[in-house]
Image (cartoon, rainbow, N blue to C red):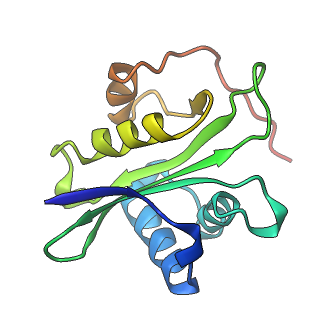
Amino acid sequence: MITIEIYNPKQTTEATEIKFTEFLFEHLGKYGDHENDIKKAINYALGKENKPGGTIVTATDQQSGTLKGVCVVNKTGMSGYIPENILVYIATDKESRGQGIGKKIMQKVIETTEGDIALHCENENPARHLYEKLGFKTKYLEMRLKK
């Protein structure tokens, strides 16, 4: 049985941050970022360094205690013209995909965050279909200038 829960930032240890970072790095695969960037998003969600905070939702196998999914949502500190939240990362264990874990994590995120939620998704990412089924709509084409 899989348990979906909001991670309590008061329980944060360096080991937990590393565990979440390594899990996301491994299971995001080609849709992920460098481990250092993932860790920054996790620290932001935990409200470190006077950041607005956010939410981390986890999926854990109750029998084995194995992590099966992690989602990181950061508060933007804005509303209206920019959604209040941005879903930065979500990944499920590669061996557990197709079992509805990602959907359950997303439902928990939608249910527990206050305000609108934005996310970035590459066109060929298979998770895009899940996001659309849950009500996410494409509003803009994102463009970036990397310096």
19 on left or right of 96: right
Instruction: Please tell me how many numbered marks the rendered image carries.
Output: 0
- Res 62 quadrant in image: bottom left
Residue sticking out furthest to the right? 147
In this picture, residue 79 sits left or right of residue 69: right
x, y percent for residue 116? 61, 27
Which residue appears at 58% of the width and 84% of the height? Answer: 14
Vertically, is 36 above or below 145? below
Report x, y in % for residue 69: 34, 58
Q: Quadrant of the N terminus?
A: bottom left
At x 65% / y 69%, what residue is drawn? 36
Q: Residue at x 40, y 66 (%)?
A: 26
Front residue of 96/64: it is: 64
Along the line of sight, the residue nearer the viewer: 51 or 89: 51
Looking at the image, which residue is at 47% across and 21% down?
136
User: Left or right: 78 with respect to 114?
Assistant: right
Quadrant position of residue 53: bottom right
Q: Please provide percent x and percent y for residue 5.
A: 37, 57
Relative to 16, is 147 above or below?
A: above
Q: Nearer the viewer, residue 121 or 72?
A: 72
Note whether 112 is above or below 59 in the view shown. above
Question: Which residue is at the front of the view, 130 or 6?
Answer: 6
